Image: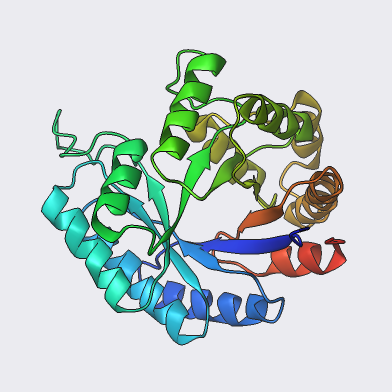
Amino acid sequence: MTVSQSFSLEFFPPRDQAAQDKLVRSAKTLQGLRPSYVSVTFGAGGSTRTGTAEAVGLLQNLGFDVAPHLSCIGSSEAELLDIIEGYHAQGIRRLVALRGDMPSGMGGDTGALRYASDLVRFIREHRGDEFTIEVAAYPEMHPEAISLEADLQHFIHKVNQGANGAVTQYFFSPHAYFDFVDRVRAKGVDIPIVPGIMPITNSSQLLRFSNMCGAEIPRWLRLRLADFGDDRASIRSFGIEVVQRLAQDLLDGGAPGLHFYTLNGSEAGMAIIPQLSFK
């Protein structure tokens, strides 16, 4: 049976009313493209964690199938179970299970569960198969991994704990994605691995994100972006062209779908997604 390609979107919790208004506008605009689901990122600590739950409810009320991100670092099992049960009670049936970053000021206290694989197992132990669980994948290697093979083994262990699918860190080389999928398949893992797609709208922002998460920006792309200087309109136009070509190459190569990091905006998604050919 052939599964048709689809796309999903990622949003982050707004920090104030103006940002919330922007999120609502962007979500309503992109909703017309009919994404399969939307995810909401998760921040460690009380205020951002509450913001995630509020954004999930807001998007759910707009009619989206919402998949909250859930991070295990710095949380007790009781706190995590409370969040999971709360989402289940409000009809959420998809979660993105992540390790997450250590909140500042917590020292060495990582919480009861140290890795995303622990969180996947924890969800399965308490809710069985009631959630579809997505996990993260790193085609260009997790920035903390000691080697590609070690990173691959961590991913496989995570999947074996009960993950249904994976969404990758963004990248700009389709070869990195297809090589990763080939290596995973060679190990007997067959879950869908969906490429994460990052729009290019602001070169300094992209460089900052990439330095933090270890995503490689090819030299040719860095040089092209540098040539535009502060010409943001030209950067956006060029970025749309580059990302649209990347996305189509991934779809044509057999990727099961695409996951767009919206940065809570709609312009790039509206320019790129309608131009793509999904099978």
Question: Where's residue 130, x and y in %?
Answer: 38, 64
Residue that appears at 76% across and 55% down: 236
Residue drawn at 27 percent across, 62 percent down: 84
Looking at this view, is 194 or 55 the one in front?
A: 194
Residue farthest toward the front in the current orientation of the protein = 1
Q: Position of residue 18 (x, y in %)?
A: 43, 77
Examine the rendered structure and indicate whether residue 208 appears above or below residue 40.
above
Q: How is the rendered protein coloured?
A: rainbow
**Along the line of sight, the residue nearer the viewer: 78 or 51:** 78
Task: Identify the residue at horizontal 31%, vertical 35% (top origin).
Answer: 115
User: Could you tell me which residue is drawn at 13 percent across and 33 percent down?
Assistant: 109
Q: Where is residue 243 shown, x and y percent of the image?
A: 78, 49
Query: Where the N terminus falls, by quadrant?
Result: bottom right
* Front residue of this view, candidates 223 and 135: 135
Q: Is residue 216 left or right of residue 44?
A: right
Left or right position of 141 against 74: right
- Which quadrant holds the C terminus? bottom right
Q: How many marks?
A: 0
Left or right: 145 as drawn, with respect to 140:
left
Left/right placement of residue 130 relative to residue 195 reads: left
**Would you identify the image quadrant in which residue 47 lies?**
bottom left
On the image, the x and y values in percent for residue 212 come to 48, 33
- Examine the rendered structure and indicate whether residue 185 appears above or below residue 11: above
